[in-house]
Amino acid sequence: MSSIKTSWSDPNTYKNDPTTKAKCEQAVKSASETTSAVKRGATDAIIKGGIHQSPSDSKNHLTVEYKKNGTHVTTKHVHT
């Protein structure tokens, strides 16, 4: 599991559901997408919203923006 720092673009996401919030953060820390982003230098993972689907990805996922010192590294879907 990665030691990447996770945060939320909206800290109130899942405010009333701490179990789901923790599961999302755990999913991000253990995702292969995170491992790949860390190899590219990412130090932060910003979760951009709650679990959702999109036309391009019908599986439940989180959209995560990876950054290094505030600079964009990559944006990935992390499946939940």
Image (cartoon, grey):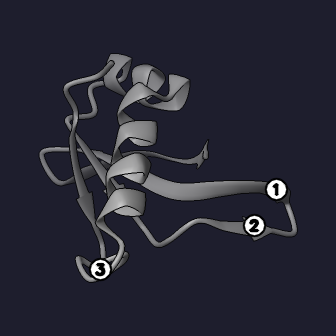
Q: Nearer the viewer, residue 65 or 79?
A: 79
Circles 2 and 1: CB distance less than 8 Å? yes
Q: Position of residue 30 (x, y in %)?
A: 42, 26
Circles 3 and 2: CB distance less than 8 Å? no
Residue 10, numbered circle: 3
In the rendered image, which quarter is residue 14 located in? bottom left
Classify 10 Å Cα crowding around label 3: few (below 14), some (14-19), many (20 and above): few
Residue at (85% x, 60% y) in the render: 56
Q: Which amino acid does label 1 sit on?
A: Asp
Q: Name the residue under label 1.
A: 57
Q: Position of residue 79 (x, y in %)?
A: 64, 44
Q: Which amino acid does label 3 sit on?
A: Asp
Q: Which of 78 and 41 is in front in this view?
A: 78
Classify 10 Å Cα crowding around label 1: few (below 14), some (14-19), many (20 and above): few
Quarter of the picture holding the N terminus: top left
Q: Which amino acid does label 2 sit on?
A: Gln
Q: Mark 2 points at which residue?
A: 53
Residue at (29% x, 65% y) in the render: 18
Q: Distance between the residues labelled 2 and 1?
A: 6 Å
Q: Which of marks 3 and 2 is nearer the N terminus?
A: 3
Q: Which of marks 1 and 3 is nearer the N terminus?
A: 3
Classify 24 as above or below 29: below
Q: Is mark 3 on a helix, strand or loop?
A: loop
Q: Distance between the residues labelled 3 and 2?
A: 18 Å
Classify 49 as above or below 7: below
Residue at (61% x, 46% y) in the render: 80
Q: How far apart are marks 1 and 3 (CA)?
A: 22 Å
